[in-house]
Image (tube, rainbow, N blue to C red):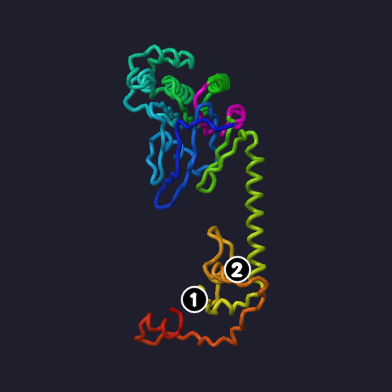
Amino acid sequence: MAPPAPITALQGVSVTFGGRPLFDGIDLSIGRGDRACLVGRNGSGKSTLMKVLAGMIHPDGGTVFVQPGARIAYLPQEPDFTGCATVHDYVVQGLPADEQDEAHRVDAVLDRLQVDGNLDPRTLSGGESRRTALARTLVGNPDVMLLDEPTNHLDLPTIEWLEEELLAFRGGLLLISHDRAFLNRLAKRTLWLDRGTVRATDRGFAEFETWQAEVFEAEDAAAHKLDRKIESEMKWLPRGHLLQAHPQHGPCPQPAGPACRPRLTDQGLTACEARHLHSLARRPAGDRRRPPSPRASTRPRAARPSSGTSLPAFCAATGWG
């Protein structure tokens, strides 16, 4: 089944805080009928990513698409009642600009959530504050709802009411929640924010842990395979071979040492290892000759530059240039 056309989407989005990338190259979309949950460890950037979709944070790179005329409603974890004398004043801000005179819609949604519109929002309890914020999110009949921890401070009857409302909602829905039962019932798709990237599956949240284990198992298998390849290629290479000149690539830029030892990093092989494996790959098929011994090499022993010798002159004299 083809995915629904996106109402809002991110393409190649990156966000950086304090010089450190929070996430990079993010691609995701929410379409009509989507019910997706966004999961990840605390501090991974879930709320920030949702704010980018809501237009509250501008990304450092990439593009944010919103279908022309589409209404995006965002429920924050902590509502800001600044400048609102009553609950009604706060909720009416959820109506589009050209529908501000339809106050009866505000009264109707507040009545369904059992909140008095005349209350001062500064005096609300945690549950009343959450229901007020939900009223503002629902009142504008949005095309997409972005809900960050919607069940916080809610009692069980209100959570059950909210679940029924969201199951009947025909627009796009993206949820962040620590309420596993809530996500199990609602989420049909899972977006996993992991190590700065988003992985997606059409499985619901109920299957997340199974999917997560499969991803980790595949990563471990790929890492083990690469480790074994490095080991097999480097096992017969004497450390001294790392000092030999390579016709295709020139000399190794530094003596054998910790930087030239085989290691697996997030970026793959070290520069020296990659160059050696590439040179091996370019040998004729069946060529299994061992590299020349460093003792038989005609390359002069590396020298220290004398006082006053420039670095270019030293490199030219020793062949390290």
Q: Residue 79: x and y, percent?
A: 41, 29
Start-end of magenta stretch: 169-186
At x 56%, y 22%, the residue is: 167
Distance in Å between CA atoms under marks 2 and 1: 16 Å
Q: Residues within 10 Å of mark 2 (few under 14, many from 20)?
A: few
At x 37%, y 26%, the residue is: 81
Instruction: State the quadrant of the C terminus.
Output: bottom left
Pick the residue in front: 223 or 109: 223
- Which element carries disc 2, helix, strand or loop? helix
- Which element carries disc 1, helix, strand or loop? loop
Residue where numbered disc 1 is placed: 250
Of callouts 2 and 1, the N-terminal one: 1
Q: In this rendering, would 73 be left or right of 215?
A: left
At x 56%, y 43%, the residue is: 199
Amino acid type of the residue tagged 2 in the rendering = Ala
Q: Residues within 10 Å of mark 1 (few under 14, many from 20)?
A: few
Q: Is residue 101 magenta?
A: no
Q: Residue 192: x and y, percent?
A: 55, 41
